[in-house]
């Protein structure tokens, strides 16, 4: 299970990045786009940091 969580976070980040792009193209309010972008960055950072040696043990 420990190896699956960072992969799931990176998958979530990819979905969120796609959501950011879609929201931007549809002309969504800037707040919604920024919130989704921040969540994508957090998911990416969490997934990458989890993969670092010594993290997530």
Image (tube, grey):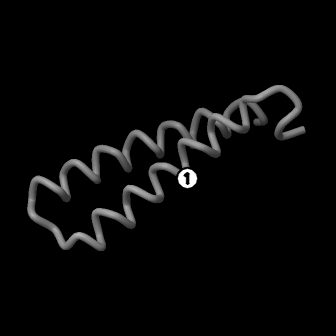
How many discs mark residues in the rendered view? Answer: 1
For the N terminus, the quadrant is top right
Task: Provide residue 22's location: percent of width, then percent of height.
Answer: 18, 51
Task: Provide residue 52's location: percent of width, then percent of height.
Answer: 76, 29
In the picture shown, does residue 14 fall above or below 21?
Answer: above
Task: Provide residue 17's location: percent of width, then percent of height.
Answer: 34, 45
Name the side, left or right, on which 51 lies relative to 28.
Answer: right
Q: Badge 1: few (under 14), some or many (20 or more) residues near its Cα, within 10 Å?
A: some
Residue closest to the eye, 35 or 22: 35
Residue at 28% x, 63% y: name it. 33
In the picture shown, does residue 22 fall above or below 55?
Answer: below
Q: Quadrant of residue 7?
A: top right
Residue at 45% x, 59% y: name it. 38
Residue closest to the eye, 4 or 29: 29
Q: Which residue is mark 1?
A: 42
Residue at 39% x, 66% y: name it. 35
Task: Provide residue 2's location: percent of width, then percent of height.
Answer: 78, 35
């Amino acid at each position: 299970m420990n190896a699956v969580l960072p992969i799931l976070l990176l998958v979530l980040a990819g979905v969120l990045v796609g959501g950011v792009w879609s929201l931007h193209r549809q002309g969504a309010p800037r707040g919604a786009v920024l919130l989704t972008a921040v969540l994508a960055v957090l998911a990416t950072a969490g997934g990458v940091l989890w993969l670092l040696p010594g993290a997530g043990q």
